[in-house]
Amino acid sequence: MNIFGEDTICAISTASGTAAIAVIRLSGPRSHEIALSIFTRQGKTLNINDIRAYGVYYGEIKDPDEDTAIDDVLMTFFKAPHSYTGEDSVEISCHGSQYIQQRIMELLVQRGARLARGGEYTMRAFANKKMDLVQAEAVADLIASRSREAHDMAVAQMRGGFSQKINELRQQLIDFTALIELELDFSEEDVEFADRERFKVLIESLKQEIKQLTDSFKTGNAIKNGIPVAIVGKPNVGKSTLLNALLHEDRAIVSDIPGTTRDSIEDTYVINGHTFRFIDTAGLRKVDDVVENIGIERTYRKMNEAVIILYMCNITEFDIMELKEFEQYINNKDKHFILVANKTDLLDKNTSLEINIPNIDVVYISAKKKDNIQQITDMLASQAEKMYSEQDVIVSNVRHHEALTRTYSDLEAIEKGMDDGIPTDLMTTDIRAALFHLGSITGEITTDDVLQSVFSRFCIGK
């Protein structure tokens, strides 16, 4: 079966429920005919030849069989190829009553449309070359975006920034491959059209660029799903109190009893347009309690996953030596370590606050009284801005990351083959594999299974 279909599809494109208005979409060769068959304007039917592209018409939808009015609507007509799907399309804006929406859908189906599958509108846009596969996936990311960075990243991909980068890399490899293929045509004459030294330089350059893209996935994934922030420290230093203060709600249980938090607690919060995923962890200490030890093990796992670590200490008891075991996180360029000195409310007013540790940001707070919490949020927002600004093109899609990783392995195999002096015809196998994996990202080369997997995650009306 052709997964794109040649028939006309319809769907409700607005969220389910009652609202002021709803939008119903039609797309396909009969969309204008079907829409006009239930539409009258000032009591008169419209002729399909009188419809203007991008024309918006006010009128009434009626059930022709029963001659009963359903709703007053606006109909917008799009003519192929100048529409989202590249096909003739119609958008019907009606009142948001669920009854009205269902009645209109029934009439459309009765007159020859069928219900759209998930993502079928965008799938048709891809099939009609209105966008490539990266741009199509960016549509879903845009709909799901919960922060400014996630939105900006999706918009950049929709506008073709990432696709252009992939196409540039692929074209460089294609140009050189053409010369190698030419050598195979003249193999009996022992001629060399492709300079092997230049090819090695090209492969090394491609590897570096692909490595940058794969490395950006950690940033892209954090932006897409929320930047992970682990709140760690000894028991009773105020981790749960800080989490509640950051989230502006009582999300975690606060108690003076050590070991109250035995498992990690996660919640997301948007600060200055940036989504953060805060993780309150079990207090770090040596205990015989099996359950609490499991929680402490999870704390270390969450620290490994985190991009930002808020290490909390009691300012009245802090010893710099307790940071000794966290050197691997402090010196990790992929993590940002912030020392949060809590319980300043317990200090004498004349006590000078100063902890000087090279390369570590220190903030002094009272989580209980919510003093200086804003300074922490400002630091977090600043770090998020830095993460985003440092990347030119950001990879946020698991499928793209996997394809790039495979491409990198193919390029290594090509490099090794040249070093080992393997015949040209064997080397082209790895070159074709690299081209395949790069092409699979944008949809230049793909399969029905991949397309079904990509578009099945879309909502019905998109």
Image (cartoon, rainbow, N blue to C red):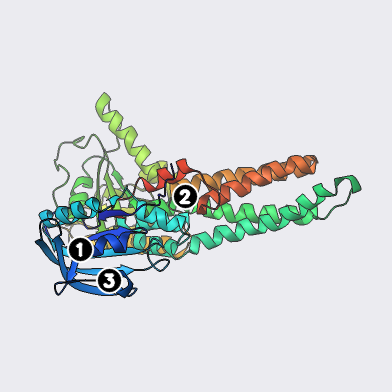
Tell me which amino acid carries mark 1. Answer: Asn
Q: Position of residue 117 (x, y in %)?
A: 32, 47
| One can see residue 104 in this view | yes
The Cα atoms of the two marked residues, 2 and 1, are separated by 36 Å
Q: Residues within 10 Å of mark 2 (few under 14, many from 20)?
A: few
Depth check, mark 1 against mark 3: the one in front is 3
The tag on residue 47 is 3
Q: Would you say 226 lies left or right of 438 here?
A: left
Tell me which amino acid carries mark 3. Answer: Asn
Above or below 429: residue 113: below
Question: In this view of the protein, which residue sits in the foreground, 221 or 166?
Answer: 166
Tell me which amino acid carries mark 2. Answer: Asn
Q: Quadrant of residue 269?
A: bottom left
Question: In this view of the protein, which residue sits in the foreground, 357 or 300?
Answer: 300
The tag on residue 332 is 2
Q: Would you say 4 lies left or right of 271 here?
A: right
Depth check, mark 2 against mark 3: the one in front is 3
Q: Which badge, 2 or 1, comes first in the chain's sequence?
A: 2
Residue that label 1 marks: 350
Q: Quadrant of residue 20?
A: bottom left
Label 2 sits on a secondary structure element that is loop
The Cα atoms of the two marked residues, 2 and 3, are separated by 68 Å
Label 1 sits on a secondary structure element that is loop
| One can see residue 460 in this view | no
The tag on residue 458 is none
Q: Residue at x 26, y 54 (%)?
A: 11
Q: Would you say 208 lies left or right of 341 here?
A: right
